Amino acid sequence: MKSILFINLHPFNVTGGGETFTANTIKSCALAGLECDLVAFERPTPSTSQLPHRLETTMVQAVTKSCAHAGRRQSWRATLDAIPSYDAIWVQQYLGARHTFDVITATAGDQPLLFTSHGHEPQLQEFITHYQPAGHHYFVEVSAYALSRLPAGVNSCAPGAGAWRSLIRPRRPNPSQAKPQGLQLVAIGRILAHKGFEHTIAGLGENDSLDVIGGCPDPTYLAFLRDRAVGKKVKFHGLLSRTLLEERIQVADALVASSTHKLYDGRTIAQPELLGLVLFEAVAAGALPICSDCPAFVEVMGHLGLREWVYKENRPDCLREKLNRWRLMPVDTRQAVLTRATEKMMQTCLWDDYWPRINNHFRLSP
Amino acid sequence: MKILFISNILPPHLRGGYELGALDIAKAFHSAGCHVTFATSKTLGALRKTDRPNLPFQVHEIFEPIYVYEELRTLDCSYVWKRSHREPALGGVVASNCVALTNLLDQESYDTVWIFNPLGLGPVGILETALCGSSRVVVHLMDNIDGVIRDHQTTGPYFAPRFARLKQSCIGVSCSEKTRRENSVLGKYGEHLVIPNGISFAKLPSHRPKPYRKGETFRMVYFGQIESHKGIDGLVDACAGLAKAGRCNISLDLFGKGSADYRETLAKRVCAAGLNDIVHFQGQKPKQELMNCLSDYHAAVMLVGVQEPFGYAMLEAIGCGLPLVTTAGTGFSEVMPAEYPFYVRSSSHTTEVIKHLASIMDDHSSALKIVADAATFARARCDFDESILPEMLKISTSPIPRAKAFDEDSVLAAYYGSVFTALA
C-alpha cells in the first residue's frame, strides 16, 4: 500500500479533538511512508442531500505533506472520481453526512476502506439502518465505546492514540515545592454546552484557579459560564496557539474535563465524547487528568491507569473531593502517579506507531 | 483452457453484428480446443428475434432479460423505470446478475472470463464479480462502454469511479484505436490492446462482382440494421440525387431488420422521393446466402455514423470485392489503406455520396481494382483465422494484471447499502 486518500466529512478549519486526531492519524501514516492527501468539506454541509446536490458539494484540499494543491477547491464528484487512483480510502467523520455511502459506492473491492468517527454524527441512525458490511471495510474507532455502537460482524478496532513520544515532557519532581494553598487547574475545549465547564467551575475549591482555553462557538453558553464564575478565580482565554496551550498545561496541577450528557439548558445528548484527547495531552505535559465518567473518558482513564480520578458526571461535589485528594497528596506520590500513567500511555497509546498497529491488526499490507 | 464468455445478448436475441461476432469468436475458441461456456441473458417473448442457434458449447441464460434496448416508450418515459432499472442495468449493478454469475463461477473455475458486452447486465457488478475469482478478466470492446456508463450515473448510486478502478485489473481488447480512446475516458485498463474485428476471408465466396456496363442497372446494396443511425436516410437521398442527375437506371437493395417505427418512416421517405421502383426492402437473409449474392451488385453503400466502432458488414463488403462508399473516421477506416478514395464525411453529405457513386459507375473497373487492393490490405490485419484468433488465444494465456483480490461482498454491499440514497 502506497497511498491513502483521507476524506473528512466536516470542515477541517476548526480546532477540535476530531480534527487533531485526523491530523495526527495522517502524520502517523506519512511517517510510515504512505502518501496521504486530505479532502474536507469546505463548510458545514447538509447531511441528507440527494445525489445531484451532493455531487456539487464543495470540498477543499487540506494541507498535507504530500498534497501539492493544498487549499484548492473541488467538487464532491471530483473527489469521488479521484478514488480509483488511491490504494486505500479513509473517511473521517463518516457519520457526518450521507456522502459516506457515495464513497462506499465508489470504492472497489480491492481498496481498503476505513472509517473513523470523531463525534459529529447526524447520520448515525441512517448509517446503522442501511450500511452493509464488506470484507474490505475497516472501522478504526477512537475508543471501545465508539466501537460498541457498530453493527455486528464488521472489521473493527480501537487502537488508541493520544501522544507523540517526542512531545512527552514529564515534570521533574521538586521536593522543595511547598504544598500549594490552591490548585492551578486547566480546562480545554471549545466552549460548547456538552463540555460541562459549569461543573468544573462549581467544583473549584476556595483557592483554586482555573484557566479555560478554547474557542467560543456558543456565546450564550459562555455568558452562562461567566455568570457562574463570578467570585472565583476563573479566566477564559479563548483560543490559544498550540505552544501557549501546552505551556498552560505544563504549569497546571491538573486538567479537568467535565463533559456531560445533560446540558445546562435542560437538553440531553446521546454521547458527549467519543474519546478525550486532552486527557492524553495532560499526561504528556505532566498534569493529572481528572474527568467525568462519560464512557469514552472512563475508557481512556483505564488505559492510563487513572480510573480513580474519574468523578461522577454532573456532581461538582465529587469533583471537589478528587481535587482535595490531589491537593493533599505528597509531591513524590503525585509524581509517581503521573510517571505510571506516562509509562502506560507510551506502551499502547502513541501516535508514533498508530498506523503500524492498525496495519498489523487488519493485515492490510505486508 | 477454460473460458467463460459473457455477453449481454446472444441469438435468438439479436440487435446487430456485435453478438454475432461474439458468437463467432466463442465458436473459434471452441474449435481451437478451449473448453467454452457462455453466459448471457434470458431470452423471452418479444426478445426472440431469430432462431436459437445450435451451438457446440453450453449457454447459460442466467442473467435478467435485457429490455433496455427495446425502446419501450411507456417505460422509457418513466422516471421510476429509469431510476430503478435502466440506470443500474446500463451504468451500475443488477444484483441478481451478480449473484447468478457468482454461482456460475463457484461451480467451475475458469482460466479466463471474457466479457463482450456487459451493458444492460449492470456492467459494474459484472466486472467486479468476475474479478472476485482468480480468473483473468478480458473486456472485449466493440462499443463505447465508458460513454454509456458515464451517461447513466444521474440518479445514483454513483458507480463511475468504482468502474474506473475495476478496469485497472482487466485486460481491454478494443476493435479499433477509436474504440480504445473512447474506452479510456473512465480510467484505463490494466492492459489495453487493439485487435480489429475479423472475418474469415477464406470462407467468403470466391466469385467477384462483374464490371458494370453502361446501359445495365447499377445495383447497390446495403446490409445491416435498418435503423436511422446507419445512415440509410442519406442513402435514399443519394439515390434521389442520382436519379435527378439523370442516372435513373439504378437500384438499391436493403437487407436487414430494424424497428417497425423506423421501417415505416423510411418507407414514407422512399415513397415521397419517388423511389419505390429503385429502393427495395429485402428483409433479413441468412449470412451465407447474403454473402453469395453480393457478387450480383456493383457497389455497397454504408453511411454509418462516425461513432460506429467497427462494422463487420463493411469488411464483408470489401472482402466480397464490392466497391464500398462509407463514412470516414469509423473504426473500420483504421484497417483500410489511407488512400482509399470512397469516403464521405457523413451520411448527410449527399453530394459526396453522389459524387463517389457516379465515379464508381463511370469507371467501375478501376473501382473494382481499388477495392481488391483494399481487401488485400485489410485482410493482412483482419483475417480472423490467420491474425485475429491467434492474437486472442495469446491473450487467454497472458499474465493477469491484478495485484490484489477483490472482496466478494463489496459490490453488493455497496449497492444495497447505498441504493436508499437514490430513493430517499
Image (tube, coloured by chain):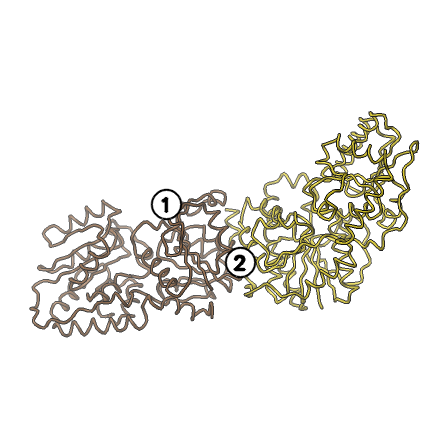
Residue at the image position 15 percent from the left and 74 percent from the top? A333
Q: Colour of chain A?
A: brown
Secondary structure type for disc 1? loop
Q: Position of residue A282 (x, y in %)?
A: 22, 64
Q: Is residue B8 left or right of residue A269?
A: right
- Looking at the rendered structure, the kind of residue marked 2 is Ala
Q: Is residue A25 above or below residue B263?
A: below
Chain letter, colour yellow: B
Instruction: Count the marks.
Output: 2
Q: Position of residue B129 (x, y in %)?
A: 61, 60
Asked if the residue at tag 2 contacts the one at tag 1, i.e. Cβ–Cβ closer than 8 Å, the answer is no
Q: Position of residue B267 (x, y in %)?
A: 80, 32
- For label 1, the residue is A43
Q: Is residue B307 left or right of residue A85?
A: right
- Quadrant location of the N terminus of chain B in the rendered image: bottom right
Q: Nearer the viewer, residue B10 or A120?
A: B10
Checking the image for residue A108, the label placed there is: 2
Q: Residues within 10 Å of mark 1 (few under 14, many from 20)?
A: some
Dividing the picture into quadrants, the one containing residue B79 is: top right
Q: Residues within 10 Å of mark 2 (few under 14, many from 20)?
A: many
In which chain is the residue bearing label 2?
A
Q: Nearer the viewer, residue B327 or A97?
A: B327
Q: Give the Cα distance between marks 1 and 2.
A: 28 Å
Q: Is residue A155 left or right of residue B294?
A: left
Q: Position of residue B126 (x, y in %)?
A: 62, 57
- Looking at the rendered structure, the kind of residue marked 1 is Arg
Q: Is residue A125 left or right of residue B198?
A: left
Secondary structure type for disc 2? loop
Dividing the picture into quadrants, the one containing residue B28 is: bottom right
